[in-house]
Amino acid sequence: GARTLAADAEVRYPLPPPGGQSTYIDLDAGIEGDASANLIVSYGKGEEKLGAFILRMKAGEKARYRLRAISQYNWFSAQPDWVALYPAGNGIELQRLSLSSGE
């Protein structure tokens, strides 16, 4: 089911070890309402943030995003143990967050 993530608040999800083995971070998300948002998808280990992606989400849009996490050196070298979502500017509806492998 969908989960509402409040604007301007980070939500962390633990990664199963080893965290950096997956190629992609996949997520299905949308915005309710009439304001756009930036969704900051970051990852890290312990208290350290190792990298991030920024998704520009348009108002009223539901979309499937596939982030090529393996393209960032820290994703596979540092073995992250969490992924965090931070909706900046507006809340979002998160339908799915998962990891996948392959080209």
Image: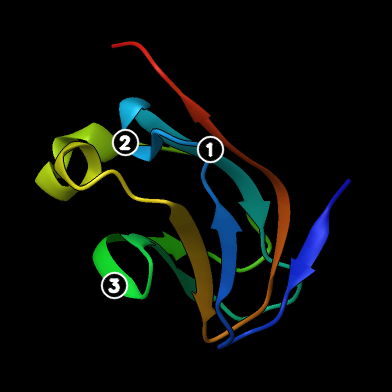
Binning the other alpha carbons within 10 Å of mark 1 as few (below 14), some (14 to 19) or many (20 upward) gives: few
Residue 68 sits in which quadrant?
top left
Whether residue 41 sits left or right of residue 2 in the image: it is left
Q: Is residue 84 above or below residue 90?
A: above
Residue at horizontal 68%, vertical 65%? 31
The image's mark for residue 48 is 3
12 vs 28, nearest the viewer: 12
26 vs 36, nearest the viewer: 26
The residue labelled by disc 1 is: 16
Q: Quadrant of the C terminus?
A: top left
Image coordinates of residue 3 in percent, x first then y, are 81, 60
Whether residue 95 sits left or right of residue 44 in the image: it is right
What is the residue that sits farthest to the top in this orientation? 102
Report the amino acid beneath label 1.
Pro
Q: Secondary structure at mark 2?
A: helix
76 vs 65, nearest the viewer: 76
50 vs 63, nearest the viewer: 50
Image coordinates of residue 56 in percent, x first then y, are 40, 64
| Residue 73 visible to the viewer | yes
The disc, 2 or 3, on the residue closer to the chain's N-terminal end is 2
Report the amino acid beneath label 2.
Gly
Image coordinates of residue 11 in percent, x first then y, are 60, 71
Display colour scheme: rainbow
Q: Is residue 99 above or below residue 48?
A: above
Give me the C-alpha separation between circle 2 and circle 3: 15 Å
Residue at horizontal 20%, vertical 48%? 78
The residue labelled by disc 2 is: 20
The disc, 3 or 1, on the residue closer to the chain's N-terminal end is 1
Q: Secondary structure at mark 1?
A: loop
Binning the other alpha carbons within 10 Å of mark 3 as few (below 14), some (14 to 19) or many (20 upward) gives: few
Whether residue 3 sits left or right of residue 40 in the image: it is right
